[in-house]
Amino acid sequence: MRLLVITPHFAPDTAPTGDVVTAVVGALGRLGHEAHVVTSLPWYADHRITEGWRGRPVRRGHHESGTVTRLHPFPTDKASLASRVLGFAGFSGLAAVAGIGARGRFDAVLALSPPLSLGVAGWLAARRHRCPLVLDIQDV
């Protein structure tokens, strides 16, 4: 099975949701499945893009179960709700474009939230690739 995974965090990012999705994608890979992950550049620990990842708004690479596209996360101050909403909206928009533009055939799209707006990105990608959407809502 080939999955398109849209998630706000993925290793080496340190967010708990990133740890979970990294473990799930790794386990699926060990079972023979492939995943293309659309995620953010690492930023969670200090709410700014981690040193060594700065300078390019989009990066492509590989992980143990497939490929990864990393996008600018629009990191913000946690204290400002308005800034966080705008940051999540910006990242979700980029993730939607990357998911829609992902190459190849996918058997399913797995979108993880928060933010809930990644559900819309996942829905758009699933429509484009004509496959089912699985929406995992965490931290409600």
Image: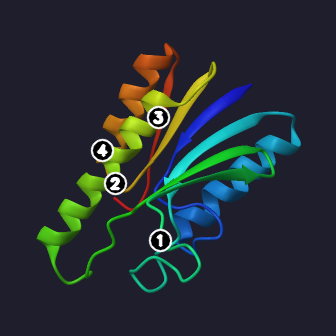
Image quadrant where one finds the N terminus: top right
Q: Which mark is residue 91?
A: 2
The residues tagged by marks 1 and 4 sit, at their Cα atoms, a distance apart of 20 Å
The residues tagged by marks 3 and 1 sit, at their Cα atoms, a distance apart of 22 Å
Q: Secondary structure at mark 2?
A: helix
The residues tagged by marks 3 and 4 sit, at their Cα atoms, a distance apart of 10 Å
- The answer to which of marks 3 and 1 sits earlier in the sequence is 1
Q: Secondary structure at mark 3?
A: helix
Specify the amino acid type for callout 4: Gly
Specify the amino acid type for callout 1: Gly
Q: Is residue 136 above or below residue 122?
A: below
Q: Which mark is residue 93?
A: 4
Q: Secondary structure at mark 1?
A: loop
Residue designated by label 3: 99
Residue 81 percent coordinates (x, y): 15, 72
Residue designated by label 1: 55
Q: Disc 3, disc 1: CB below 8 Å?
A: no
Specify the amino acid type for callout 2: Phe
The residues tagged by marks 2 and 4 sit, at their Cα atoms, a distance apart of 5 Å
Q: Secondary structure at mark 4?
A: helix
* Display colour scheme: rainbow
Kindly identify the residue that appears in the image at 52 percent across and 72 percent down: 15
Kindly identify the residue that appears in the image at 54 percent across and 83 percent down: 51
Specify the amino acid type for callout 3: Gly
The residues tagged by marks 1 and 2 sit, at their Cα atoms, a distance apart of 17 Å
Residues packed near mark 2 inside 10 Å, few (<14), some (14 to 19) or many (20 plus): many
Left/right placement of residue 19 relative to residue 51 reads right
Residues packed near mark 4 inside 10 Å, few (<14), some (14 to 19) or many (20 plus): some
Q: Disc 2, disc 4: CB below 8 Å?
A: yes
Kindly identify the residue that appears in the image at 67 percent across and 57 percent down: 22
